[in-house]
Image (cartoon, rainbow, N blue to C red):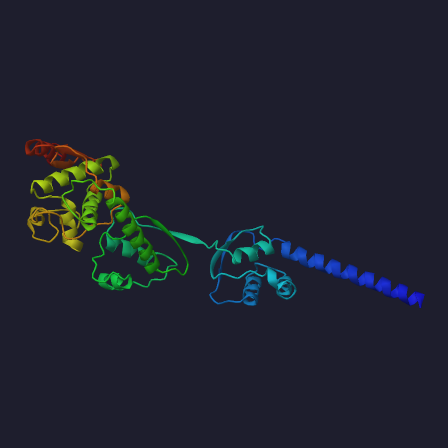
């Protein structure tokens, strides 16, 4: 009997050692580096379960010991991540455990989409249509249909989308980016309007948005924005036409090919500020925050005219004679 007990004890010890060794080996396979030599993208399909993803990773050569990952579902189900659909960037050297943690995290691969200040809504939509890995829900729709999807039915879209760099994940939609940009512009306009000067020649935030779009299209020089706003303010107060070329260009639409003729300046469009009094009926571009702030806080002064110097800045004049001399110097002679 004693020999039997000793044998059973030894057998139990051997079995325990084997189990412990097996457990250690299993854990070592989960902690081992995944089988890739360079960074790669892996996408967790929408609706895919754990075993399907493990099989897919093994089929793509990302993991070698898929049995270890399948055993995890049986032995430690509480440690399994809640897989998130989308793209993830896998790095050489990361362990199997780190791989699983990544696939359950919010560290999805992001793609940037930059909408520059001064672009039009049409240019923004073209960029959205061309953006890779974005779901194009608005492609082919007209502007009115897009605004209806954004719950802004009847709103002219120009100017209402904040220019910035937006990050998105594969599977996101262009409508989501438009919603973000619209919300940003509405919030920014509200903040800026609350800090407006007391003596503006317009009365609504929307008119400030229109003015900001004119400023945005007239200059890219930060130090000039408030001075241009001041010129426009004084011209409006005196009943002078704004006579700003970007409104002519916007009114021409796709007919514009890089030059403005005398006939274009005389053409009666709703946007041609050489013909109409006051501001155009809508914004003509997507203004940034700096132009919005300039629109509601114009620089005091006496200048009524400005002309491009050809280097991205302008010459400002108080009188028509001074302005004509500047035109001769910077435009006609050039």
Picture layout, residue 35 above or below residue 299: below
The image position of residue 319, as x and y in percent, is: 7, 32
Quadrant that contains the N terminus: bottom right
Which residue is pictured at 79% across the width and 63% down the height?
Answer: 15
Q: Is residue 254 left or right of residue 10?
A: left
Snapshot quadrant of residue 96: bottom right
Front one among 175 and 62: 175
The image position of residue 39, as x and y in percent, is: 51, 52
Which residue is pictured at 32% across the width and 48% down the height?
Answer: 164
Front one among 46 and 235: 235
**Tally of marks:** 0
Picture layout, residue 305 above or below residue 1: above
Which residue is pictured at 86% across the width and 62% down the height?
Answer: 10
Res. 299 visible in picture:
yes
Snapshot quadrant of residue 70: bottom right
Which residue is pictured at 88% across the width and 65% down the height?
Answer: 7
Res. 34 visible in picture:
no
Picture layout, residue 202 above or below residue 85: above
The image position of residue 225, as x and y in percent, is: 22, 38
Quadrant that contains the C terminus: top left
């Amino acid at each position: 009997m004693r020999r039997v007990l000793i044998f059973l004890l030894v057998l139990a010890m051997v079995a325990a050692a084997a189990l412990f060794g097996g457990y250690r080996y299993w854990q070592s396979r989960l902690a081992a580096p995944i089988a890739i030599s360079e960074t790669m993208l892996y996408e967790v399909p929408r609706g895919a379960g754990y075993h399907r993803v493990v099989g897919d990773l093994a089929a793509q050569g990302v993991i070698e010991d898929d049995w270890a990952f399948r055993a995890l579902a049986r032995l430690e189900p509480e440690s399994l991540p809640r897989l998130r659909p989308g793209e993830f960037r896998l790095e050489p050297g990361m362990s199997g455990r780190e791989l699983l943690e990544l696939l359950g995290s919010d560290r999805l691969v992001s793609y940037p989409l930059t909408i520059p200040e001064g672009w039009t809504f049409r240019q923004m939509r073209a960029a959205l249509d061309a953006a890779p890995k974005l779901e194009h829900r608005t492609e082919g729709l007209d502007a009115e249909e897009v605004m209806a999807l954004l719950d802004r039915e009847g709103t002219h879209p120009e100017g209402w989308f904040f220019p910035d760099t937006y990050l998105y994940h594969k599977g996101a939609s262009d409508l989501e980016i438009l919603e973000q940009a619209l919300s940003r512009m509405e919030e920014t306009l509200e903040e800026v309007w609350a800090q407006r000067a007391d003596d503006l020649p317009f009365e609504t935030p929307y008119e400030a948005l229109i003015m900001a779009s004119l400023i945005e299209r007239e200059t890219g020089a930060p130090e000039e924005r408030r001075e241009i706003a001041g010129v426009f303010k004084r011209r409006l107060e005196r009943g002078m036409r704004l006579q700003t070329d970007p409104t002519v260009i916007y009114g021409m639409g796709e007919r514009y090919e890089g030059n403005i003729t005398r006939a274009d300046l005389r053409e009666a469009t709703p946007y041609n500020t050489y013909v109409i009094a006051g501001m155009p009926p809508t914004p003509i571009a997507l203004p940034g925050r700096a132009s919005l702030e300039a629109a509601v806080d114009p620089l005091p002064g006496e200048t009524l005219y400005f002309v491009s110097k050809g280097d991205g800045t302008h010459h400002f004049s108080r009188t028509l004679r001074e302005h004509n001399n500047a035109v001769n110097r910077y435009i006609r002679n050039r």
